[in-house]
Image: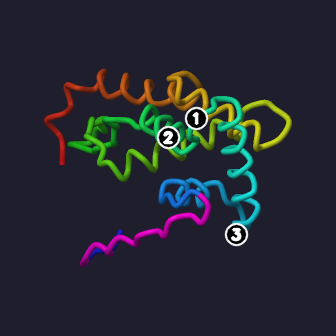
Amino acid sequence: MPRRRTPKKRTLSADPVYNSRLVHTIVNHLMKNGKKSLAYKIFYGAMKQIADTTQQDPVKIIEEAIRNATPLVEVKARRVGGSTYQVPLAVSSDRGTALAIRWILSSSKTRSGRNMVVKVTNEFLDASKNIGNAIRKRDEVHKMAEANKAFAKYRF
């Protein structure tokens, strides 16, 4: 965390095929060890499978999946007088989108299946239908925030 000033936000360029910033962000999160071309190959394969199975625009389904997995509140640890409280806080839109992408991709990596294209496809389709591990993670976070609503007075 910088002490003096917050750094300005960097804007991503849109991806070349779908002309979407969200797709570019997902590819950046999917990328490992700087291999962006492999991440693009995996994600575009998943988009093609989504388009084949649903006969709809895959970008709309991806947006729906991200919207469904985005949390509204989260808990942060706050230390007050020697004890630590889990304080519920509202999530900004950028952070909510980043969390949703991270949860969907991590749950697709832990999913059983043959290759990464199939796993990413199935996880995005599940998230767009409000089922899957990413949705379960969002519900866990919401339950935790609901349980610790009494500590909302320690918000910072």
Question: Circle 3 sits on which residue?
Answer: 34
Query: Who is closer to the viewer here, 111 or 57?
Result: 57
Name the kind of residue labelled 2 in the image: Lys
Query: Who is closer to the viewer here, 150 or 139?
Result: 139
Q: What percent of the width, then of the height, locates residue 69?
A: 46, 34
Q: What percent of the width, then of the height, locates residue 156?
A: 18, 49
Which residue is farthest bottom? 4
Q: What percent of the width, then of the height, locates residue 4?
A: 24, 78
Q: What percent of the width, then of the height, locates residue 51?
A: 65, 38
Mark 1: which secondary structure? loop
Closer mark to the observer between disc 1 and disc 2: 1
Q: Look at 33% across and 42% down and name the residue there.
A: 76
Report, in whole angstroms, how far the alpha carbon at label 3 lies from the one at label 1: 31 Å
Is label 3 in contact with label 1 (beta carbons under 8 Å)?
no
Name the kind of residue labelled 3 in the image: Gly
- Residue extent of the magenta highlight: 4-17
